[in-house]
Amino acid sequence: MATSGVAASPIKYCLQLPVQCPRLREKRVSVSNFGRSRSHCTVSTQKYHPRRMPLVKCAMEASFGGSTDDSAAIFPRINVKDPYKRLGINKEASEDEIQAARNFLIQRYAGHKPSVDAIEAAHDKIIMQKFYDRKNPKVDIKKKVREMKQSRVVQAVTSRFRTPATKFIVKTSIAFIVLGALTVLFPTEEGPTLQVAISLITAIYFIHDRLKNKLRAFLYGAGAFIFSWLLGTFLMVSVVPPIFKVPRSLEVTTSLITYVLLWVSSTYLI
């Protein structure tokens, strides 16, 4: 190109527009320094490779808490009083789980001494409590009762009893309360023989009324009467006198115990 008799080539300015997206291409624009000269635009085929910006990255990590340097991290549960909650475990955790929780927290908050001390204190307290409980085991009453109810013997016994209608319970209760009142109010030198015989007949009658079987009613009634009388005699001879003195005679107190057991048998036994 000639300008004022001097040969010269147009000066070109190259502007590079970097784009951070790797899918886009780098654009190269060439512009002539003369207003009327022909200008053109070319697109290079080279991919743009983004450069690392460590300063910007560090600033972002500091703003959002994404720093990988946990040397000065503070344990968030440092002031929790419960040692199990402080370590983040439950009270049924095994010793291996307790040790694993302690090691994990110690490794994570190793750069902060108060956090390490709090973790160690919680771990030591739990271990000492486990050792004390193992040396002085506590009796879990609820667990023992549950195990007793689940035993075959208890289930076999409880399966022989059933709660009847409320009307039937009231009727049997009134009958045996009257027998007990007669035994206490009208004692005899020979003992409450008549009242005891009436209680046996009453028990057989009520059992038959529920089961509708004479043989079973007689066997259940007679067996309940013998067991009740023997148990009442044993209690009044060996168990009750050492504890407290009974104002009534042996026969009267034994009869009252027999009435209670006969009432249970005639009302609930099946």
Image: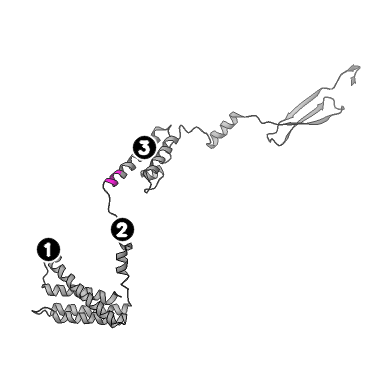
Nearest-to-viewer mark from 3 and 1: 1
Secondary structure state at the residue bearing disc 1? helix
Q: Residues within 10 Å of mark 3 (few under 14, many from 20)?
A: some
Q: Tell me what residue is drawn at x 29 percent, y 65 percent.
A: 153
Q: Is residue 106 at least partly visible in the picture? A: yes
Question: Residue reaching furthest left?
Answer: 189
Give whichever of discs 3 and 1 has the lower sequence position: 3
Extent of the magenta region: 131-135
| Relative to 62, 184 lies left or right | left
Q: Which residue matches tag 3?
A: 120
Give whichever of discs 3 and 2 has the lower sequence position: 3
| Residue type, numbered disc 2 | Lys
| Residue type, numbered disc 3 | Glu
Q: Is residue 244 positioned above or below 212 on the image?
A: above
Q: Tell me what residue is drawn at x 72 percent, y 36 percent.
A: 24
To which quarter of the image does residue 162 belong? bottom left
Q: Which residue matches tag 1?
A: 242
> What's the colour scheme?
one colour
Q: Is residue 57 positioned above or below 176 on the image?
A: above
Residue 205 colored in magenta in the image: no
| Relative to 1, 175 lies left or right | left
Q: Which residue matches tag 2?
A: 142
Q: Residues within 10 Å of mark 2 (few under 14, many from 20)?
A: few
Q: Tell me what residue is drawn at x 32 percent, y 66 percent.
A: 155
Magenta part, dominant SS: helix
To which quarter of the image does residue 181 belong? bottom left
Q: Which mark is residue 226?
A: none
Q: Is residue 171 at least partly visible in the picture? A: no
Q: State the separation of the CA atoms marked 2 and 1.
A: 30 Å
